[in-house]
Amino acid sequence: MTSLDRLFLARAYELAARGRGNTSPNPIVGAVFVRDGAVSGEGYPHTAGEAHAEIEALRSAGDVTGATLYVSLEPCAHDGRTGSCARALAPLRLARVVIGTLDPNPLTHGNGATMLHEAGIDGEIADDDEARRLIEPFAVAIERKRPYVALKMAISLDGFAAASPGERTQLTGDAWSAYVRDLRAAHDAVMVGAGTVRVDDPLLTVRPPRHRLHPYARIVVAGARPLPPASRVLAPVPGYDPTIVLSSGGAAGLDLEAALRGLYERGIRSILCEGGPALATALIERGLVDRFYWAIAPVLLGPEGVPALAPGSSARHGRELRFDTVERFGDDVMLSGKFA
């Protein structure tokens, strides 16, 4: 890998990110054709069922004989709604293909790269962290047959999510709120617990509205106790699917694993969970959190505060975290990462 290879591959990653939120259940992918040292074509999939990144880039590139293709994800080797990209690329007499990471889908994994190699095209797999991060939700959904779950929490410096039980507490500033809107737009659904609905009465929409081809879903984990019928989250909103309410229907409690599998079967591949503490604790206890976004506000709430995680929960013990992102949003600091 040369410095130019890294540069053009980074451009493929930038293109991939443009499709975030619209390609589900497919991954986001970016592709760049480079011929004689200059970009001749670029592309990314705009929505599921339309042309993949490689084909979009090919349409704008024209003749690609002797060109190098930089693609964030291994070209698919199986025939879906749009056909195999690897099969379409094989006869084009490309000089090289540089791939960010292999496709975790077992229908393609390694097969796309093999098809190109057998066609006489030199190939290189960068195996980049950034390429894997781009398809993190897709990879989890493919492997575990449930939606990818990202947990977003905002806490005070002394570890509390609210000043007192039942009190709505705004901890973080406008910069963090704007980032959360971007997070919502990047996932298929946003999910909260019934306690959050009762205290905050949220809409769970993205404001201002974003152009999005894949409809949003709003999910409330309600347990056995009914939600207030006038809750804003239950009202219909243009551009959003009807709100999904998950209820146990009994004293045994909600089977979160089964609920997530049911959401997967409904086509939901990624969820941003915005708490509150009871739901966050339950998800962590069951090993259902794939990434966390933990915002820390520079305030102290004192002894009457509501802990971010339920006291005495097993979620508080023996879990190793690995941070891979630390960012500042105004006065707030966000830590993001995964459980080891």
Image (tube, rainbow, N blue to C red):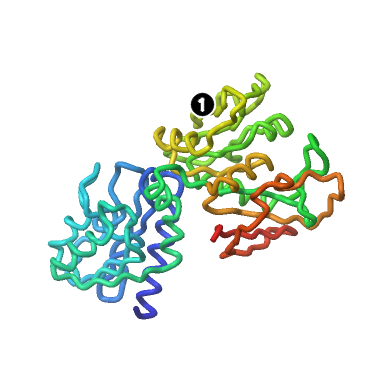
In-image side of 130 versus 231 (left or right): left
Q: Nearer the viewer, residue 240 or 162?
A: 162
What x and y, as percent, mark residue 145?
A: 39, 43
Which residue: 25% across, 70% down? 68
> In the rendered image, which quarter contains the C terminus?
bottom right
Which residue: 39% across, 74% down? 6
Provide the secondary structure element on which disc 1 rests: loop
Q: Nearer the viewer, residue 338 or 12?
A: 338
Against 189, residue 28 (above or below) is: below
What x and y, as percent, mark residue 116?
A: 19, 64
Query: Callout 1, which amino acid?
Result: Pro
> In the rendered image, which quarter contains the N terminus?
bottom left
Against 111, residue 183 (above or below) is: above
What x and y, as percent, mark residue 297?
A: 75, 55
Which residue: 63% across, 35% down? 193
| Location of residue 24 (image quadrant) | top left
| Location of residue 113 (image quadrant) | bottom left
Residue designated by label 1: 242
Q: Nearer the viewer, residue 214 or 193?
A: 193
What x and y, as percent, mark residue 16?
A: 40, 56
